[in-house]
Each structure stands twice: as C-alpha cells, then as structure tokens.
Image: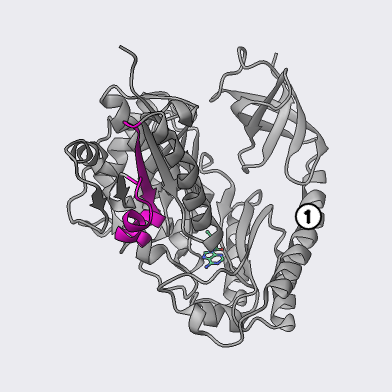
Amino acid sequence: MTARRYFIETWGCQMNELDSQRMAGQLMAQGILPTRDPQEADVILLNSCSIRDKAQQKVYSRIGEYRLFKGERPQLRIGLCGCVAQQEGQRALDVVPDLDFVLGPARVGELREVLSRRDAGERVLATGFPEVRPFDLDAIARDGSHKGMVTIIEGCNKRCTFCIVPTTRGAERSRSLREIVKEVRHLLDYGFVEIELLGQTVNHWRDPIENLDFADLLAVVAPMAGLKRLRFVTSYPRDFTPRMIEQVALHSNICPYLHLPVQSGSNSVLRRMGRGYTHEEYRALVAALRAARADLAISTDLIVGFPGETEAEFQDTLQLVEDMNFTALYAFKYSPRPGTAAPRLPDAVDDVTASRRLQILLDFQNVIQRRLNEDLVGREYEVLVTGAGRQTGTLAGRTPCHRIVHFNGEPSMYPAGSLVQVRVDRALTHSLLASSLSA
Ligand code: 5AD
C-alpha cells in the first residue's frame, strides 16, 4: 500500500510558518507523509495570509488550480487554513464547492479531528477563537535543523487602523513562562541552536499568572544551555522598555538584530494609523537600543500611500529612512482591508502615486543598504549555515545581525545549523559574499 501524502503551501509571516509545521506534524503522526508535488497529494493545505489584498487573491487562484486535481484523485482533501480562512469562513465554502474544510489560525491544533469529520461527510468550518486550544508539542514537524520557532504570544490588542491581524488572529493571549521554557528546552535538547520567539507584538508578552514581562522572559530564556542564538519577532516600538533594552545589552547570544516596524516617518500619518508613537519617539528608541548594543542591525516595515498621505508626509518617511540606516526594509503599498478603520479615512492615494512612492522608497533604501553592506567588507563573522547556496560548492547562512551570506563550502562538511567563521569579500544590496576561514 502506498502512503498517503500531504502538500502544504504557506504564505505570510513566521506564525504561519510555524502553524504549517504544526499541521504537518499532525499529519505525519497519522502516517500521512510529505510530498513536493501537489498533484501527488491526498491532502493539500493552503496556509494563507490576508495582510494585503494581493495575498488573499493569490490563495483563491491557487485553490482554483488545485481543485482540478480532484478529477484524477477524487479522494483529495483541500483545506483553506490561515488568516484568509478566519476572515472568509463560510463564504469560502460557499464560493468554492470543491473546498473540503476551512481551518482558522486559532484552531490549527484541531486538524486531525477536522479531517476525520470530513471523512464522515461534513464540509467543516472550524474558525473563531475557542478558549481551549490543543497544542501538541510532539506533533510539530520542525523543518530545518537550526531554527526552532516558539510562539510566546498570539493575537494582537492594538488597533492600528490599517491592520487586519486583530480580526484574523484574535485578541492577545500570552503563553505562560513555564510552558515557553519547556518548549525551548525541548528544542535545545533536539539540537536546535537558534530559537526564534514569535508574536505579533512579541515584546508585549506578559505571563498570564505571575507579574512578569518580556524583559523577565529574556532574562530566563537567554542563559539556557545550548542556546547559541536568540531572536524574536515582531517587536512593537511602543512596548520596548528600558529593562528590555538592558537584557538585549546583557546577553551576547541575543542576536544584534531587531525588526522594528515604523510604518511611516510622518507624525500626522502615524496618528492616522493609530500607532501611538511619534517619529521622534521611534528615533529615541533606536538611539537607546544602539547605545546598548553598538552592532545592532535594525530592519523595518513601511507603508506608502496610506489614506491622505501628502508628498510632504512621504518626504518625512524618506528623511527617517535616510537617518536610520536600516539594514533591511519591507515596504508596501497601502491595501484597504475589510473590518479596519483606515478605508473610511478621506483622500485615498491613487495607485499611480502609491506605486511611484514605493519605487522611490525602495531605490532610496537600496543605495543606503549597499553602502552599509560595503562597510562590512573585510569583517569576520560567525555564520549560521541555513542550507546549500544557489551554486554548487556554496553555502548560505546568516550573520548574527541576520544578513544573508553566501560562501564557499560543501553541505557535507557544514550541514544546516553549523557555525562557520567567514570573512566578507564583497557586498551586494541584499546579501554578502564571503570566504570560509574554518579549516
Ligand atoms: N496595507 C499594506 N501593508 C500592510 N501591512 C499591514 N497591513 C497592511 C495594509 N493594510 C504591512 C505593515 C506590517 C506588515 C507585516 O505588513 O507594514 O508591519
């Protein structure tokens, strides 16, 4: 008998990546094995993202492609998972007759049960935010042997006027320090050297019982034996406290890299976005972080074409980008999302203007980024190998400051998860080329 196979396609954030690992784990525990070929699959899961309209469009067009496989494989099950599942719910089942089930992000732990309900004939709608959410630590297919992801806080209580996350991921829920430490320990025992703590507002974590915050969590987790690199995404600027900055300064295994979305460099736009800080406050935070950790690399997210954004407000964003020396920048055209407040704001920016601003911003950042990377030529880094490079005889990895490095070496010598000393030879805009110094 040939084994049943699954295929999972994942879009969006690290939370989705981890949710896909959790779903894969549940399938493997049932003896359903992975395949790279969706045409060969018995279960296809589309783990979707709804942060911008484009992402949502993509998942629907993909379902349209996969449902054709049912002609050859009538037993095929197709599930819409992730944030579009939560957002669309019953509508997705109504619109796509071949869709077998809809599984929201807060119900990932119920995949097995949902599949058996489907086998019994029901087209299952599993969305919403139940109080009790099964989480099986041992049924997670942790792919990649270097980075273990641990969710510490789910959902979001902020009300940024552009953002759909509070609707799709629900209200904030922190896991207890005890549970988090247990999971990190488990991953370190398995040989993971890098731990990535996850949360939509990761630094807003609070222990649900004791009076502990994210600084206390870092103080407990960072010294754990075997932990070479500790990272966390995504930090909310306003939630950073001096005690947290102290912890970042104190533990050398906390990577000198932070993703700190600013969204705009204009105070009036920030106010309309409901971000709760000014660009001056953001600058002061970055200065404090860099004073605590001189080698700290910071990346950010920016939205252009937010309703009412004037040319002058856009210039304020360029000014901030010029001053901040971000090591990476993720910029997006504003996309109106259902159930959010921003679409009701006056003076929508037309698409031509938004596209032009996006291009200006990206070109502007590329020059900065190239210069920052060129300053690193000749420097030596310990690189964590993440896999084979694009060309044979090369490997890819990450510096502690999270830059992508390509260097000479064989996967047989340095499997993913190895730490290799390299020297930077050349700088590109988005990566570094280096030579291995290890024998
Ligand atoms: N339109 C465009 N970009 C958005 N983001 C979130 N919501 C929207 C939206 N409606 C961006 C923000 C966020 C990143 C994950 O996606 O910059 O930080």
Name the quarter showing ligand 1.
Answer: bottom right
Task: For residue 307, say whether it is visible.
Answer: yes
The residue under label 1 is 366
Q: Is residue 89 one of those drawn in magenta?
A: yes
What's the residue at 63%, 43% (across, down)?
A: 401
Chain part drawn in magenta: 74-99
Give the percent coordinates (x, y) of residue 293.
Answer: 60, 52
State yes or no: Cβ of the residue under disc 1 lies below 8 Å from any atom of ligand 1: no
Q: Amino acid at mark 1?
A: Asn
Residue 409 falls left or right of residue 108: right
Up the image or down, 404 lies above or below 276; here it is above
Up the image or down, 415 lies above or below 46; here it is above
Give the percent coordinates (x, y) of residue 244.
Answer: 45, 57
What's the residue at 26%, 42% (across, down)?
A: 109
Q: Quadrant of residue 192?
A: top left
Residue 423 falls left or right of residue 199: right
Could you say which is closer to the camera, residue 127 or residue 316? 127
